[in-house]
Image (cartoon, rainbow, N blue to C red):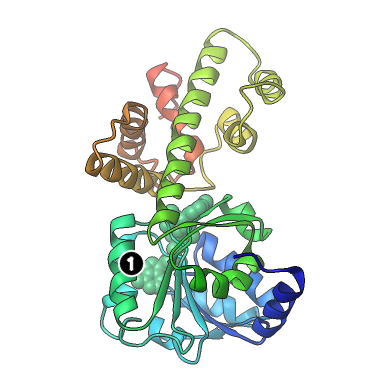
């Protein structure tokens, strides 16, 4: 079903007075909650870190003491948490959203988590009369800040239409990709490509460096041709500069690659490229890079080519 522009505008105007319970105010969630505030929604914010709530309150949100507190009188609850156990905790845990859903009876999880867990939560919440969407994102902290995320949504069509005005406050490419869990599957495909692409960039930079080629020039040339990619564009400069600190953490990518492998194994789909790059992420974490950005994958190649400072 497609909405015409007038229907969409009406829907958006109606929702402007709505209240969003937002759970998980980290690198991504903070920016997404701020964009909901900017779009005119009221936000009730919760995180296990008190300082993250206080920060959002100074920006115009109301603070909450728990996920259920964020859901109180809310039309929708949106979560942006690290991994599957944290999402299960706010749904099934004591005082969780299964027992205390928002008045709008709509939950949207935008974290990257297990599609199997998503289908289970979707079924359990549906039995309790609550709609659940999996809506993971791509675009990183910059996309979250600029409200230009790509949002891939799994779940029921009517829930998708109800959530759409909120998605539009946070992203630009918003696609309903199928039933519960389908959003996570598409996101895992995205992560698989990102990981293998990053590995290819590491190999090109390692070869270029050993051959005495200027790496900035190499990157610029590659960006103008068929080897161009988002990873080369956005992470290339930090890789070349040896700046591993900021960005999407190695730990989170490793979590995503684990989810890719679990799904592939359960469906008997061989993914040899993913298996190889996953072991390099494991190596990076073993060398203390877990909290560094994904560009730190190049440090695996530093070590293999004896270029490492550590
Ligand atoms: P983050 O670790 O920066 O933020 C997670 C937040 O959740 C933290 O503030 C933490 O205190 C809070 N939290 C943890 N457990 C909680 C609980 N039980 N109740 C309430 N709050 C809790 O992570 P992030 O980078 O914002 O990523 C969030 C999700 O988005 C992850 O699933 C990640 O894979 C995905 N993602 C991240 C990026 C990125 O570039 N950072 C991009 C796309 C998708």
Residue 48 seen in this snapshot: no
Relative placement, left or right, of 229 versus 88 is: right
Which residue lies under the disc numbered 1?
Answer: 86
Q: Is residue 268 above or below residue 107?
A: above
- Residue at the (42%, 86%) spot, across then down: 65
As rendered, which of 186 and 254 lies closer to the eye?
186
Residue 66 position in % (x across, y down): 39, 83
Relative placement, left or right, of 139 versus 277 is: right
Relative placement, left or right, of 296 versus 181 is: right
As rendered, which of 112 and 125 lies closer to the eye?
125
The answer to whether the residue bearing label 1 lies less than 8 angstroms from the nearest atom of ligand 1 is yes
| Residue that lies at the very extreme toward the front in this rendered image | 1
Disc 1: CA contacts within 10 A as few (<14), some (14-19) or many (>=20) = some
- Residue at the (50%, 80%) spot, across then down: 76
Q: Secondary structure at mark 1?
A: helix
| Residue that lies at the very extreme toward the bottom in this rendered image | 73
As rendered, which of 134 and 38 lies closer to the eye?
134
């Amino acid at each position: 079903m497609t909405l015409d522009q007038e229907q969409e505008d009406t829907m958006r105007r109606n929702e402007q007075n709505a209240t969003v319970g937002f759970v998980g105010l980290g690198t991504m969630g903070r920016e997404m909650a701020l964009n909901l505030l900017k779009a005119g929604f009221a936000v009730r914010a919760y995180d296990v870190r008190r300082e993250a709530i206080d920060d959002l309150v100074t920006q115009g949100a109301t603070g909450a003491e728990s996920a259920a507190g964020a859901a109180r009188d809310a039309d929708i609850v949106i979560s942006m948490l690290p991994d599957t156990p944290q999402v299960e905790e706010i749904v099934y845990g004591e005082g969780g959203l299964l027992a205390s859903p928002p008045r709008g009876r709509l939950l949207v999880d935008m974290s990257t988590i297990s599609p199997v867990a998503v289908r289970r939560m979707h079924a359990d919440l549906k039995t309790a009369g609550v709609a659940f969407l999996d809506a993971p994102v791509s675009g990183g902290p910059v996309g979250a800040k600029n409200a230009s995320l790509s949002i891939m949504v799994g779940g029921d069509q009517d829930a998708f239409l109800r959530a759409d005005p909120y998605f539009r406050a946070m992203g630009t490419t918003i696609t309903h990709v199928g039933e519960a869990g389908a959003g996570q599957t598409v996101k895992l495909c995205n992560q698989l490509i990102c990981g293998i692409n990053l590995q290819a960039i590491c190999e090109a930079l390692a070869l270029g460096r050993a051959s005495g080629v200027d790496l900035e020039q190499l990157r610029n040339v590659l960006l103008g041709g068929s080897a161009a990619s988002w990873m080369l564009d956005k992470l290339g400069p930090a890789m070349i500069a040896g700046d591993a600190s900021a960005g999407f953490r190695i730990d989170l990518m490793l979590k995503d690659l684990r989810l890719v492998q679990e799904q592939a194994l359960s469906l008997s789909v061989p993914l040899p490229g993913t298996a190889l790059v996953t072991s390099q992420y494991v190596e990076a974490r073993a060398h203390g890079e877990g909290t560094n950005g994904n560009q730190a994958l190049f440090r695996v190649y530093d070590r293999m080519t004896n270029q490492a400072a550590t």
